[in-house]
Amino acid sequence: MERPPNDISLPDLARLTVETFVISGASLEPPYQVPGLLGEQAGVFVTLRTSNGELRGCIGTIEPARETVAQEVIQNAIGAATRDPRFPPVARHELAGMQYGVDVLARPELVRGPEDLDPDHYGVIIETLDGRRRGLLLPGIEGIESVEAQWQAVHRKAGIATGTPVRVERFTVTRFGKE
C-alpha cells in the first residue's frame, strides 16, 4: 500500500484514511519518519461531519496510545468512521461530502472542579474516584456555551450522576480542519 506524503495535513490524513478503509477495507500505512507534529506523541480526536455539518462520528485517545500523531490519526479516523456507537459505519456514498477535523490534545491537568473550566477554551475529563466511569468533552462544542452546560454534558456522557465525587482534568486542543 502506498504511504501518504510526509507533509500531509492532519485532516487530509484522516480523509485519505477513511476513504481507503471504506473503499478497500485496508488500513493506511503512516508516513515514514514524519516531521513536526505528525511525528510527535499526543492524544488525538478525529471528528467526521456530513456535508451539511452534522456530526457523523468522533473517536479519540486522551493520551497517546501509539508512537506518533500520524498513527493516532489513522487509527482514530477508522474508529470514527466505523466504531462510534452513535452511528452506523460510514458508507461509500457518504465519502464525497464528508468533512474532517482533527484535535490534538495537550496533556490534561488536574483541577479543582467546574470553577476552573471554560467550555470555549478547555475540554474536560471527569472520572469517578473508583475509576469505573470516565467521560471527556472537547472544548468549543456547539450548544455548550456555559460551564454549567459543559459540566452537565460531560456527566451525561460519562453516565455519572451530577454531585458524584469525581476527579476533574482540563486540557486544550490544537484544532485542524472542521471540529
Image: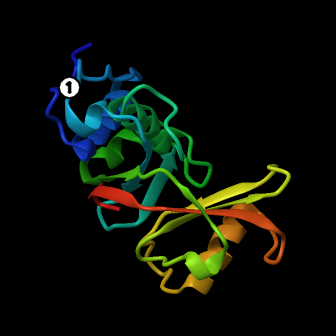
Q: Badge 1: how crowded within 10 Å, few (<14), some, or many (20+)?
A: some
Which quadrant holds residue 39? Answer: top left
Inspect this view and state whether residue 16 appears.
no
Residue 119, percent across and down? Answer: 48, 76
Provide the residue designation for mark 1: 4
- Out of 19 and 150, give the one closest to the viewer: 150
Inspect this view and state whether residue 25 appears.
yes
Taking the spot 48% from the left edge, 50% from the top edge, the residue there is 107
Residue 6, percent across and down? Answer: 17, 27
Q: Outermost residue, top direction?
A: 1
- Measured along the vertical axis of the image, is residue 179 above or below residue 4? below
Q: Is residue 135 left or right of residue 11?
A: right
- Count of number-bearing discs: 1
Residue 49, percent across and down? Answer: 37, 58
- Out of 94 and 120, give the one closest to the viewer: 120
Q: Secondary structure at mark 1?
A: loop
Which quadrant holds residue 25? Answer: top left
Q: What is the three-letter code of the residue carrying label 1?
A: Pro
- Measured along the vertical axis of the image, is residue 84 above or below residue 158? above
Q: Is residue 92 left or right of residue 36?
A: right
Q: Is residue 32 left or right of residue 22?
A: left
Which quadrant holds residue 24? Answer: top left
